[in-house]
Amino acid sequence: MPAVLFVDDEASVREAVRHLLIEEADIELHLADGGAKALELLAEHEFDVLVSDQQMPGMKGLELMQEVRLRAPDTVRILLSGQVDLSHVTAAFNEGLLARFMVKPWKDEELVGAIREGFRQRRVLTESRDLLARFERLKQQVDELGRAVRATCLSVRADNDAGKDGEFLRNQLLRGLRND
């Protein structure tokens, strides 16, 4: 079951998200009241998607995103904020900190859609890495097979050359015996 970690310092916002996502039976939801608690949960669980408010006491949302990128780089990160600073958001996208930015207050269907898209992104990333690993294993097997074929060909060629040399010597000996 895909897991999402929602981080906001306001209890009413966390409760609204709980009610919104309770209808989504195929989502495992975890809630945190700030960056420190989110990092504790991240140490205990693997999350497909992290949704965090930007304006929180202590650790800001972008600071949390940086930590999550270091600790769980495959977790898809979504930032929420009621106060938009486009230069910070743009920089965060350029640095690969965010997959998506949403303005508070959000529309419920947009938040659910963003989370579902995050799950899809995580699944595609995981499948891509798995396929790449399989490709690398297959490439290694093909390389090993190629080396074995080359070695066999060289061995067969050597045997054929030895056979030709042996035939030549036999013919020479037979000629020598006939001449005697």
Image: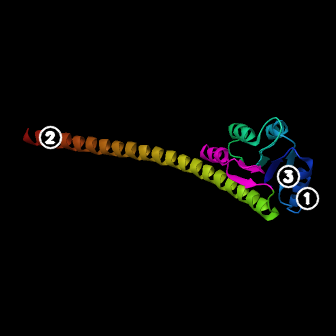
Residue 163 horizontal/vertical position (percent): 27, 44
Give SS at disc 2.
helix
Picture quadrant of residue 43:
top right
- Residue located 89% across and 46% down the image: 10
Q: At numbered mark 1, what does the secondary structure look like: helix, strand or loop?
A: helix
Classify mark 3: residues with Cα within 10 Å, few (<14), some (14-19) or many (20+): some
* Label whose residue precedes the other's in the sequence (1 or 3): 1
The residue sitting at 79% across, 64% down in the picture is 109
Residue under the image location 20 percent in, 41 percent down: 170
Kindly identify which residue carries mark 2: 172
Name which residue type carries label 2. Gln
For the residue pair 133 and 149, the one nearer the viewer reads as: 133
Q: In the rendered view, does 115 fall on the left or right side of 167? A: right
Q: Is residue 42 left or right of residue 137?
A: right
Q: Nearer the viewer, mark 1 or mark 3?
A: 1
Residue nearest the observer in this picture, 134 or 22: 22
Q: Which residues fall within the magenta stretch? A: 76-104
Q: Mark 1 packing: few (<14 Cα in 10 Å), some, or many (20+)? A: few
Residue 13: x percent and y percent?
88, 52
- Per the model, the C-alpha gap separating discs 2 and 3 is 88 Å
In the picture of the structure, the residue carrying the numbered disc 1 is: 19
- Residue of label 3: 29
